[in-house]
Amino acid sequence: MTDPLVRMTGIRKKFFGVPVLRGVDLELYAGEVHALVGENGAGKSTLMKVLAGIHKPTAGTVEVAGETLELSSPRAAQDSGIAIIHQELTLLPDRTVAENVFLGREPTRYGIVVDRRRMAAETARLLDWLGEPGISPTAGVRGLSVAQQQVVEIVKALAVDARVLAMDEPTAALADHEVELLYTMVRRLTERGIAVLYVSHRLTEVYDLSQKITVLKDGAMVTSRPTTQLSSDQLVRAMVGRELGELFPDRATETGDVRLEIRAGGNDRLRDVDLTVRAGEIVGVAGLQGSGRTALAQAVTGVDPLARGELLIDGRPIRLRNPRAAIAAGIAYVTEDRKSEGLALHQPVRDNALLVRRASRGALTGVRQRSVPGGSTDVDDLLGRLAVTTGRSNDEVRYLSGGNQQKVVMAKWLAIAPRVLVVDEPTRGIDVGARAALYELLRGLARDSGVAILMVSSELPEVIGMSDRVLVMHRGSIAGELPAGPTEEAVMELATGYTTALANGGAT
Amino acid sequence: MTTIALPARKVQFRLDATAIVYLALFALLVIGSIVVAARGGGVLLDQAGILKILTGCTALGLVAIGQTLAVVAGSLDLSVAYLIGLCSLVTAEVMAGQGSMMLPAVLAALGVAALVGLVNGVVITALRVNAFIATLGMALILKGVLESRYTGPAGSTTKDFQRLGYDRIGPVPVSFLLLLLVAVGAWWFLARTRPGYHMYAVGGDIESARVSGVRTSRTIVLAHVLCSLAAGATGVFLASRLGSGAPYVGTDAGYDLQSIAAVVLGGTVLAGGRGGVAGTVGGVMILSVLDTIFDDLGVNSFFKDVVRGVIIIVAVALYARGRLARRRLVTPPAGADQ
């Protein structure tokens, strides 16, 4: 085999004395996709940032094409052909495509005047090279779709003459159908001899794309093998030490009365929605991006209320004008965007957990004081039971892992002892180990306290593994309903609209 | 090779903020002319009226152009008003009525201004003090200097130098032409040069800028130095108008908040990253035209301030609405988490 393009040897990194990487070796070859997997906190992002010159390693060396790098700044890494695509899009929405692509490296005349013509031409050339000539270099980024923005992000990375491209959870912001576009992009990159380091939680992507897999756990390398020699069971075991099938708890054996019902509901994003969720039941909502999944969640929770039709809680019709009314009716909403909508990141855990209860003190009076499982709404107790790492209730939330942050969001809603719980993408950005805990938590709520749960998710395995029934949405209405444990094909058929007519005939 | 059919967004036609500002300015001139004529206030845009509007623009315009740079870079400067007073004094005192000291006086004033801007920038970037607090602190320090050393006007500028403030070509003051020159320069700087690009980047998203290799601290410091230089130039100009330096010439006119008001009225987003000099100049002119109309109508000063306040709030609300509507369209639905 040829020499590796990048060779990282014995990389160690400590943050405030805490070791995050404990001597990791990694080799990247030109034209190869190398997947880096591991739970949150395993050190994936840190390793990537060491490569990109954002973090300086405590020990260890990085060689690119045989030359040892002095990795001290993002710029130095860029100069040696290393580019990174961050988890969040780092584009400036108010600037044009070309301005974003060349941000920080604008070509100039006389050393100061930006050569806008050259910048646009170069951008057009790169877009063309990537096979995306449809995006105009002078278009504003704000007007692009997320998938197009991802393309711009890649072009931006390539503009440094990248030989190595590190991608951190590149699909986190993408909808399902956009992921396929990203695959095509990544394959084109490798065809052109670029080495790709691909960090992802989603094992499907890892198997679809990579030639090699390296698993990190607690800052050390567990295994590094060609993808073909590592089964998904082995992979999951290497990451968390448990089997994939054990991720989901048992389904409901019995359910109660109808808790939540919508009759002929609609607004400007939804039409003719009929659904019921019983006490103790978890109903999954699947569908493509833009199919109305989130719109449904927002309608039920008063964020974007129904304009037509009826919504009933425990058989009583209720008009939800705003989230406050929904909360008063016992409806909790765990939003998909945990960081901006779910948490006050700079506030302590405890205050976050108390947020809803404090805010709705007035709204809740008059409502029967309900109790949470275990008979107490005491928040410390609650946090303890959710197994948010104990003794940290005064820490600011932003220091917690994704999984623990999500538990805090859950805690804040459980503090009002909800009757209906709506969760949107409950495990986005959460590693496999912490997912199992959240699944168990959701199931426990349904089983032990009779909460009716509506679970919106774009991850099919999750919808299929967790739900007692699955509603599939398509173009703002419910395209069909499937019983527990449907196949992915059945869900996708409904979601893409192939069988809408048929399913409408068969569905309740 | 196949091209992926990327879903394109519907492009909406929408006037950008700068166009709105100038349309508003035009509308204001038309309506103002009619109202002034109807209420017997004479002609709004006669020679005297134009002169008054343009003169009113010059000082505020200079400060506001500098302020635009700071705001675009995601910062702001509350110390400009006292700095203007200080620089007018430096100019007049160094000059002390001597023609030969004209250039050194101007350079001294600008030097003081640049130094103040440098300190502002360094405090904000190196000490990581919020810009609001850092420049407020600087304002108080300058206030202390002015109050302890001056009780009133001091120094004097030469007759020649005062021509800078009073010469005009027809109804157009020379100083206004100089302002336009500065405005074009600042526009060119922001829209065409690398440091200008970086100011938008830093103001738009400082973290994105940093990981893209932009030297963020340097950019913020530069924005503050230029902002202070513009304030310094305003001080020099006012020294020329007044014939002497006056400690409170900047604060009496409320140039700190007025300049920020003009910047946001011109469509620059207070949070940074969006906007520009062209809008600011329009904003300044709107404020100046309003003043002139009110004077022609003999409106009392309370009413003036109320109207000014309402206009600024309404304008910013309108811009915010436009942006909100657009953001709705394109927010990545799956909040790019983690």
Image (cartoon, coloured by chain):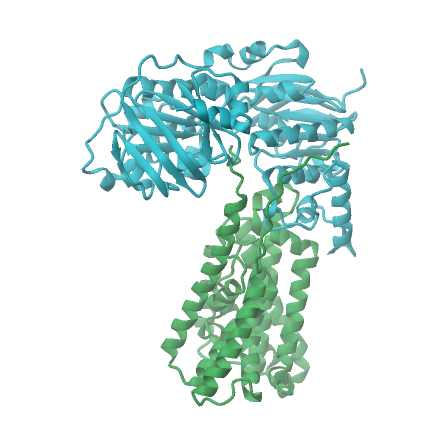
Chain colours: A cyan, B green
In this rendering, position of residue B214 left or right of residue A419: right
Q: Is residue B179 above or below residue A154?
A: below
Left or right, residue B21 beside residue A415: right
Residue at the right extreme, as displayed: A2
Image point (68%, 49%), residue name: A99
- Quarter of the image containing the N terminus of chain A? top right
At 41% across and 72% down in the image, what residue appears?
B307
Question: Can you say whether B191 is above or below A455 in the image?
Answer: below
Tell me the quarter of the image containing the C terminus of chain A.
Answer: top left
Where in the figure is residue B336, as x and y percent of width and height?
53, 35
Q: Where's residue A309, x and y in %? A: 34, 39
Q: Position of residue B242 (x, y in %)?
A: 54, 83
Q: Is residue A104 visible?
A: no
Q: Nearer the viewer, residue B196 or A455?
A: A455
Q: Quadrant of residue B171?
A: bottom right
A121 or B168, which lies in front?
A121
Between A370 and A8, the one nearer to me in the picture: A370
Locate residue B328, reporting x and y percent.
50, 46
**How many marks on residues?**
0
Residue at point 59%, 67% (across, down):
B230
Observer-nearest of B137 and A390:
A390
Q: Is residue B87 above or below residue A219?
A: below
Residue A433 visible, this orientation? yes
